[in-house]
Amino acid sequence: MLRMRDVIAIGAVCAVLAAACGDDGEEAAPAETQPPTTTAAASSAEEAELESTAVPELPGAGVPVTMARGNWSTGYMQAAIYAALLGELGYDVSDPAALELAPSNAYVAMANGEFDFWVNSWYPNHDHFLAGTMPDGSLVSDHVTPIGWEMGTGGLQGVMTNKSLADEHGIRTLDQILTDQDLFAIYDAGDSTPDDGVLQILGCPEGWGCHGNINAWFETAGWTNVEQVEVGSYEALIAEAISRDAAGLPYIVYTWAPSAYVADLRAGDNSVWLSTSETSVSPTQVEGPATLGPGQCSADPCNLGWDTADIRATANNDFLAANPAAARLLELIAISPVDVALQNVAYSLGEDTEEDVRNHAADWIATNRATVDGWLSDATAAA
């Protein structure tokens, strides 16, 4: 039975990522009926079956693969799923937990061949990491390639604030808070360093793509009275926002979906997504405002600062060229954001060990076994 927090998490993800909650409605085609076989034909068929029972060598047999994963817990299960499925192709895959990196380090390390791939890329957040320069003058993108559509248009992100405060004061945008003296005073009085004339928002950890994205808003808009502040890990940061919300204190916090965080800060209930400004000030929002449910954003149009993200695998080019079966599998794997949200809730409620994560991945694979077997067959044929 689904717990209430599960229902809230599903509802939150569906509200912001409606396409993720659909059903493809495909039904299996009926099996073709074959005519009865003669005794001779049956004998030949049995011989052929015996020959076919010889187990072929798996395409990844004897091939070591080094994975990494992002240093945010909402992507842990996805990394474990990919590792397990590559293992089913015979690859000797390292534990993704053994190499946990921030994006600012991951892309250069991947380009250098220090590891083969990860599945925690968020585009367009991470575009600027691909544009980074290597010591030899080449670009990171010359050495690595985004591959597959793990969760195409599957990630939504932005900053949130108290709904009660937004309703009481008619708050529409972050720009309004920063330029209205009375509103600014309310938020400045309750931030990390009260009444210092600079609003500290609970932003994005340094080294993540969103950290640079948010700083770009400040520069583009000319906001000089705001900065991002960290209070340790992201888990500590979001806990601070949830604590302030429960106490009725003002907060502005960066977060995203799919995650369990949007089951605590519920857009349209106790919080709202906060539009940055009346017109976009973000270089990572080029496709237009976000389309959210009624009451979920502080303004309409809702300029969250990011286009809906494609969550994808990214891999070293040499690894892809040398391992066509692995490359094909990376192209094929797709995971529902709703499944990720549910696992994130389970993780947040205490199923948070590495063994738990591997079990979550194994359960997901078992539930989707027929689809997974199709991917594995296709990948094997590509070898």
Image (tube, rainbow, N blue to C red):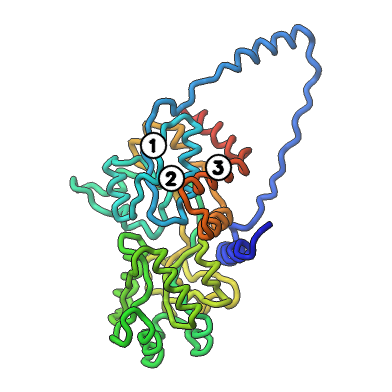
Q: Quick one: label 2 or label 1, which is nearer the N terminus?
A: 2
Query: Dots 3 and 2: beta carbons under 8 Å?
Result: no
Circle 3: element type: helix
Say if 65 sits above or below 12 in the image: above
| Mark 3 crowdedness (10 Å alpha carbons): few <14, some 14-19, many ≥20 | some
Coordinates of residue 21 in the picture (x, y in percent): 62, 58
Residue position for label 2: 147
Query: Dots 1 and 3: beta carbons under 8 Å?
Result: no
Residues 300 and 52: in front is 52
> Which quarter of the picture shows residue 280?
bottom left
Residue shown at 39%/38% (left/top)?
94
Q: Is residue 233 visible?
A: yes
Say if 274 sits above or below 33 in the image: below
Residue shown at 48%/78% (left/top)?
245
Q: Amino acid at mark 2?
A: Ile
Residue position for label 3: 362
Circle 1: element type: helix
Residue 75: numbered disc = none
Coordinates of residue 354 in the picture (x, y in percent): 46, 47
Query: Dots 2 and 1: beta carbons under 8 Å?
Result: yes
| Mark 2 crowdedness (10 Å alpha carbons): few <14, some 14-19, many ≥20 | many
Residue 320: numbered disc = 1
Q: Amino acid at mark 1?
A: Leu
Q: Quick one: label 3 or label 2, which is nearer the N terminus?
A: 2
In the picture, measured across the screen, residue 99 lies left or right of residue 334, that is: left
Cα–Cα gap, marks 2 and 1? 10 Å
Cα–Cα gap, marks 3 and 2? 23 Å
Q: Quick one: label 1 or label 3, which is nearer the N terminus?
A: 1
Residues 180 and 344: in front is 344
> Which quarter of the picture shows residue 124?
bottom left
